[in-house]
Image: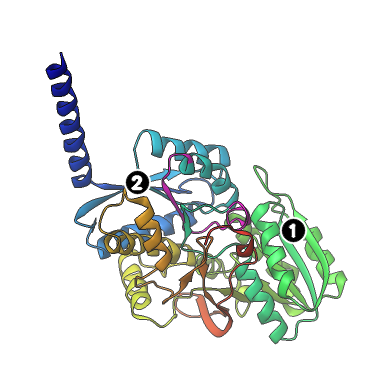
């Protein structure tokens, strides 16, 4: 009996060893949750195209193992995003869950990923609750925490002498964080803050708010309206004639992904407007030059900030896995390497904060006319500043 029992145990151990070896020889699976349907699908398309380009640029492998990307559509729905995260973990057995355009989708999807002890790497959404006291060792981002881009824009507004500012943003977590970031650094007077309806039935008629802007005496207007709301706002802003009366500033609204759409529609009022970001197509480094040139050659358009952050995912992960010994299942070692961020990023070199978010450089940008309307760097406005929640994160 003892012999049979020992033989059974030995056989089981051998089988387990073979399974582990075979797993190490199989593909590294990355689940990528983005928006592939709804009017916001253009954002997801840019991310998917960037991921596919990055996969080619890394040679299709990490540590000698092929990389398999499983794309899932969140439909801009937090409940669906959570379902897709559960499916990727339970059915597809992915090693990493990544993506996430929308803050509320990421907030809904994070729990099953962390419960399964998998890495979660955001390529856009940057909620504050993952930056502070509720930060997580398995969370990393290739994009800034939500407050940081508007914080940089606030510095730019101060330098440009803006005195009276009207603010418009959708009433959800990211909209509130964009406004919080801006007002934390802006030193002038905030005349009015208008939070408009968001969710399943977002407000897309801004005529009342634009009338209030005109009556307010503000010299400048700040807006945050992503995806299809950006187009609705831009058309109505142009029709209102306010471009002759106020300076327009935005984040994630009038940018590389929306400008060609506005160009085709002849919405000239968006030209010369200003924004801030960590990235622009004209950022001068070798990795970015290759990314922009190859993206434009392959897809016939310039990449967006959404594409840039998604592209970085694969070289970032490849470097971390290979620098930590090549075993993606050694999550502690891979986490440590991810914190080093020792890879050729399209943003240039940067540091990672204790909460997994980049400590970055941010630039003021201006929208410019050309064969393809895009953005151009004006000046560096913020550098080396951690997000305002990092001090509350207990991780070292």
Magenta residue span = 115-134
* Residue placed furthest toward the top: 1
Colour scheme of the picture: rainbow
The quarter of the displayed image where residue 128 is located: bottom right
* 273 is higher (above) or lower (below) than 317: below
- Where residue 163 is drawn, which disc sits there? none
Would you call the spot at circle 2 few (<14 residues within 10 Å), some (14-19), or many (20 or more)? Answer: some
> Which residue lies at the image location 68% right of the left edge and 69% below the top edge?
238
Mark closest to the chain's N terminus, 2 or 1? 2
Residue 132 magenta = yes
Give coordinates of residue 185: x percent, y percent.
Answer: 71, 75
- Where residue 95 is drawn, which disc sits there? 2
Tag 1 residue: 206
Give coordinates of residue 91: x percent, y percent.
Answer: 36, 33
> Which residue lies at the image location 35% right of the left edge and 46% below the top edge?
95
Is residue 279 toward the left or the right of residue 224 in the image? Answer: left
- The overriding secondary structure of the stretch rendered in magenta is loop
Residue 258 magenta = no
């Amino acid at each position: 009996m003892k012999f049979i029992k020992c033989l059974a145990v030995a056989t089981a151990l051998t089988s387990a060893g073979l399974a582990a070896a075979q797993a190490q020889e199989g593909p590294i699976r990355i689940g990528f949750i983005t928006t592939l349907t709804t009017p916001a699908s253009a954002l997801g398309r840019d991310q998917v195209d960037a991921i596919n380009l990055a996969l080619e640029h890394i040679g299709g492998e990490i540590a000698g193992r092929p990389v398999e990307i499983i794309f899932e559509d969140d439909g801009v729905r937090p409940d669906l995003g959570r379902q897709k995260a559960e499916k990727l973990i339970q059915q597809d057995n992915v090693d990493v869950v990544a993506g996430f355009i929308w803050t509320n989708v990421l907030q809904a999807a994070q729990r099953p990923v962390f419960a399964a002890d998998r890495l979660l790497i955001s390529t856009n959404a940057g909620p504050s609750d993952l930056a502070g006291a509720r930060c997580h060792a398995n969370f990393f981002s290739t994009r800034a925490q939500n407050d940081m881009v508007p914080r940089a824009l606030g510095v730019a507004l101060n330098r440009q002498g803006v005195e009276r500012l009207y603010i418009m943003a959708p009433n959800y977590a990211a909209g509130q964080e964009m406004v919080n970031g801006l007002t934390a650094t802006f030193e002038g007077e905030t005349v009015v803050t208008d939070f408009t309806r968001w969710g399943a039935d977002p407000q897309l008629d801004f005529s009342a708010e634009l009338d209030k802007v005109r009556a307010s005496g503000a010299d400048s207007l700040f807006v945050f309206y992503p995806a299809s709301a950006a187009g609705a706002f831009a058309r109505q802003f142009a029709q209102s004639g306010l471009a002759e009366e106020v300076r327009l500033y935005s984040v994630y609204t009038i940018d590389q992904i929306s400008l060609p759409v506005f160009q085709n529609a002849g919405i000239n009022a968006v030209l010369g407007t200003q924004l801030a970001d960590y990235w622009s197509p004209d950022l001068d480094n070798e990795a970015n030059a290759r990314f922009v040139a190859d993206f434009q050659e392959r897809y016939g358009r310039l990449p967006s900030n959404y594409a840039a952050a998604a592209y970085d995912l694969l070289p970032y992960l490849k470097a971390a896995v290979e620098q930590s010994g090549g075993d993606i299942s050694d999550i502690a070692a891979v986490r440590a390497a991810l914190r080093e961020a020792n890879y050729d990023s399209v943003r240039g070199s940067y540091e990672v904060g204790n909460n997994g978010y980049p400590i970055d450089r941010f630039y003021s940008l201006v929208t410019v006319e050309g064969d393809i309307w895009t953005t151009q760097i004006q000046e560096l406005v913020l550098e080396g500043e951690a997000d305002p929640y990092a001090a509350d994160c207990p991780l070292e």
